[in-house]
Amino acid sequence: MALHVGREAAVDNENTSKSFSDEIPVAMMEATMNLTTHLRQSESFLRVKAAQEKLNADVAALRLVKDL
């Protein structure tokens, strides 16, 4: 039984040593990277970022958020 556990541990080590990108086809990785780039530049994300910056600049608003 101890040998069986040892084999399981060895298999776990092999699985965790693989890189996530080794298991994803290159075309899918490129498409995913393009999607994230476009999302970060989208109007919605830019508005959220601007709103967060305004909130962080407003001491009274930050105090209110903290109190809530």
Image (cartoon, rainbow, N blue to C red):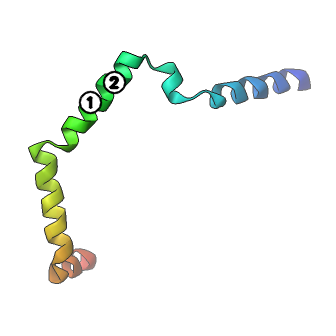
Residue located at (84% from left, 26% from top): 6
Specify the quadrant that holds the C terminus. Answer: bottom left
Vertical arrangement, residue 43 with respect to residue 18, above or below: below
**Residue at position x 13%, y 60% in the image:** 50
* Residue 34's disc number: 1
Q: Nearer the viewer, residue 10 or 36?
A: 36
Spot occupied by residue 34 in the image (x, y as percentages of width and height):
26, 30
What residue appears at the point 51 percent right and 20 percent down from the top-left corner? 23
Residue toward you, 54 or 27: 27
The answer to whether the residue labelled 2 contacts the one labelled 1, judged by CB atoms less than 8 Å apart, is yes
Residue 59: x %, y % from top left: 19, 82
Q: Secondary structure at mark 2?
A: helix
Using residue 51 as the reference point, say whether residue 17 is left or right of it: right
Image spot of residue 7 (x, y percent): 81, 22
Q: Secondary structure at mark 1?
A: helix
Q: Residue at x 70, y 25 (%)?
A: 14
Horizontal side of residue 24 vs 58, given as left or right: right
Q: State the image quarter where residue 33 is shown.
A: top left
Labelled disc at residue 1: none
Label 2 sits on residue: 30
Q: In the image, what residue type sits under mark 1? A: Asn
Question: Is 29 left, or right, of 20 in this rendering?
Answer: left
* Amino acid bearing label 2: Glu
